[in-house]
Amino acid sequence: MASAFGVALVTGANKGIGFAIVQQLCRQFPGDVVLTARDEARGRAAAQQLQAEGLSPRFHQLDIHDLQSIRVLRDFLRKSSGRKDPGRLRAGDFSQAEVTMKTNFFGTRAVCTELLPLMKAQGRVVNVSSIISFAALKSCSPELQQKFMNETITEEELVGLMIQFVEDTKKGVQQKEGWPDIQLVPYAVSKMGVTVLSRIHARNLSEQRRGDKILLNACCPGWVRTALGGPTVIKSPEEGAETPVYLALLPSDAERPHAEFVMEKKVEQWAPLCQLPSWLPPLLYP
């Protein structure tokens, strides 16, 4: 039976930051919390672990690489609660350019495309990006910086840029074409795409559903002990979950932040940063 308070959906939630977000939402959000994972066995095990703590997450399988899987989840949400409510849309793995872009950018975009129409008034969407997207922007050519910072960039234009990055990388001409010269560049560029996609979707919500007070933001959880961050990083997944949960639980009468990038619960203006955070490993940027 669906809660009268709606549904909070967390993707990629069988471990790490996603798991910690589910844990905190189960304690703070009065509605249903749905934990999703690509691997059903691992997802169910994560849900059972939380249930052993006295929490009550629901589980649903979701592979953001698979449009049919996304649509099955969409139909599940329609049947269980009428429409989707506060949500967090996340993707996390990285390797080579094409695989990374497919997961972090195109997977996130596909989930948003299918589920945003279900969003109730006063819903909350939190896309987990990274401050590394700022490092990527800083290291882009001025021409690419202008495109990614354009306040009126369309989703189609952004998709074209992401495809172009993959093609340039395959050809080995990415630096010549002005793409960042930093470590983990596929991950960084994919997260730059998520940051800009969030701005576009938030702008569209403001134009098309102005009175619904839906707030959509991107955020950085910080440098967290995950598969990407490594085991020696100071910040725990529970600490990394604080900003995403804060944004997911913004009060119903809140009007901002919206269309912003938030780190440590503070808004960061989307621009090439002169000073990147001290905890960001120097090897990631020039």
Image (cartoon, rainbow, N blue to C red):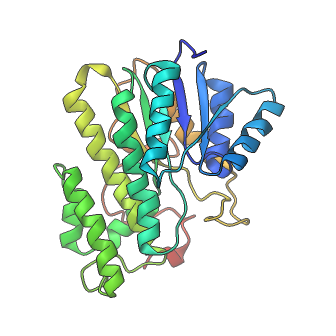
Q: In this rendering, does residue 86 appear at all?
A: no
On-image quarter of the C terminus: bottom left
Which quadrant does the N terminus fall into?
top right
Residue 36 position, x and y percent, is: 59, 41
Vertical comparison of 160 with 252: above or below: below
Residue drawn at x 32%, y 50% as measured from the top left:
197
Q: Residue 103: x, y in percent?
A: 46, 59
| Residue drawn at x 42%, y 44% as measured from the top left | 111
Name the spot of residue 42 as percent of width and height, x first.
71, 49
Residue 9 in the figure: left or right of residue 234: left
Which residue lies at the image location 65% right of the left edge and 51% below the top edge? Answer: 39
Q: Is residue 268 visible?
A: yes
Which residue is pictured at 50% across the width and 36% down the height?
A: 73
Q: Is residue 282 above or below residue 189?
A: below
Horizontal and vertical percent position of residue 239: 66, 46
Q: Is residue 112 above or below residue 102?
A: above
Residue 103 vs residue 259, the one in the foreground: 103
Q: Residue furthest right?
A: 52
